[in-house]
Image (cartoon, helix red, strand yellow):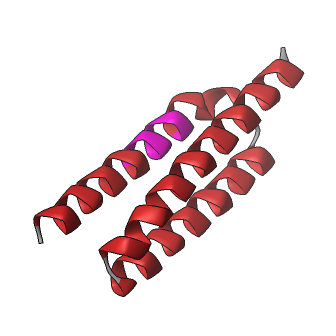
Amino acid sequence: MARESQVLAKLRERLEELSQRIEELLPDVDEKRVEELRAEARVVRERVQLALAQGAEVAEETLRSVGRSIEHLADRLRQFRTKDD
């Protein structure tokens, strides 16, 4: 149970990080791109919920996947900001 709690805490932390990154960059991104990013964030959230329903081992793999998704979103945000500058 302690391991599952650790995994859940990390998942929450990653999701919070994702949310903060998106919110920080929203003023610099147009509405269409914002919707694309929000759609990606919803996919990440759904994957996390599915993993949590399946148990800690699956959640751990999802945590790694969420980390990759966050990095992908951050890269896309940087690209959008660069294009707009």
Q: Residue furthest top?
A: 85
Q: Nearer the viewer, residue 27 or 71?
A: 71
Q: Quadrant of residue 4?
A: bottom left
- In the rendering, at what x and y percent does residue 81 appear? 76, 23
| In-image side of 22 versus 63 (left or right) | right
| In-image side of 46 versus 35 (left or right) | left
Q: Which residues are magenta?
A: 16-22
- In the rendering, at what x and y percent does residue 51 appear? 43, 77
Q: Nearer the viewer, residue 42 or 51?
A: 51
Q: Quadrant of residue 12?
A: bottom left
Residue beneath the point at 80% across and 31% down: 80
Q: Residue furthest bottom?
A: 54
59 within the magenta span: no
- In the rendering, at what x and y percent does residue 73 appear? 66, 43
| In-image side of 83 versus 13 (left or right) | right
Residue 72 visible, this angle? yes
Instruction: Examine the rendered structure and indicate whether residue 77 appears above or below residue 54.
Output: above
- In the rendering, at what x and y percent does residue 28 appear? 68, 26
Please identify the quadrant where the C terminus is shown: top right
Please identify the quadrant where the N terminus is shown: bottom left
Prevalent SS, magenta region: helix
Residue 29 visible, this angle? no
- Report the number of numbered marks: 0
Instruction: Examine the rendered structure and indicate whether residue 35 appears above or below residue 42.
Output: above
18 within the magenta span: yes
Residue beneath the point at 40% across and 47% down: 14
